[in-house]
Image (cartoon, grey):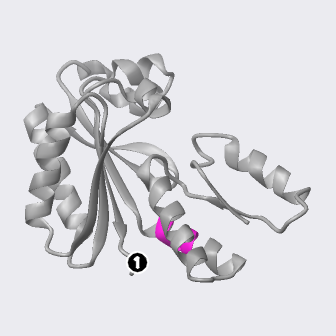
Amino acid sequence: MVSVHLSGEMSGTVDAARVAARDAVLPVEVVDSRSLGYGLGFPVLAAAQAAARGAGLAEVASVARDTAAATRSYFYVDTLEHLRRSGRVSTFANLLGSALAVKPLMHITDGSITLLEKVRTSSRALSRLEDLTVTAAAEDPVNIAVQHLSAHARAQTLADHLTARIPKLSHLRTVEVGAAIGAHTGPGMLAVTVSPHIP
């Protein structure tokens, strides 16, 4: 069995899974995705594909880890208020002095959410999100997930632009995030995850 989880930097779930794996009656490979949202979802899907092809336990776990390592996630929030309320605002302490004016672009590095850029307007932030995604996709076949919270029109516009700009886009899905992520980001959040396409 392969068990893929939310980043250990953001949750204790992966550590709990490792403890449980030691007592499991079946062999269990625990994988820390070092991400969340579709940064976790794409490694899970890749692992499931490998398992469906008949890959063994070690190979399935390796596919999950390799996909996670090659996956990139970027996101934008309308306001820092929800991050502050959730207790995660310390990560962005250098933004507090101009919180009302700044539209932060963030990404996930080493399993944690970190500031990527400070942008002054939402339109500029969304344009940069699009450009960052195109750069991450490069010339390779990729899968992309556009994720949002109460921002369907923005998400669809971004998805349309990415479809037009990325020549080797294999699959693109647009989804609304659940409560666990939404509670930290608030409405208006827009995220993009780019992952290698595995035939």
Please provide percent x and percent y for residue 81: 35, 18
90, 23: nearer the viewer: 23
Query: In the image, is 154 to the left or to the right of 6?
Result: left
* Quarter placement of the N terminus: bottom right
Query: In the image, is 148 to the left or to the right of 134?
Result: right
The local secondary structure at tag 1 comes to loop
Identify which amino acid the numbered label 1 is placed on. Answer: Ile
Judge whether 85 appears above or below 17 on screen: above
**Residue matched to label 1:** 198
Identify which residue is drawn at 48% across, 28% down. Answer: 88
Main secondary structure found in the magenta portion? helix
Please provide percent x and percent y for residue 150: 27, 27
Judge whether 94 appears above or below 18 on screen: above
Judge whether 103 appears above or below 58 on screen: above
Identify which residue is drawn at 11% across, 45% down. Answer: 157
Please provide percent x and percent y for residue 126: 15, 42
Please provide percent x and percent y for residue 122: 13, 32
Q: Count of labels shown? A: 1
Identify the magenta region: 62-68
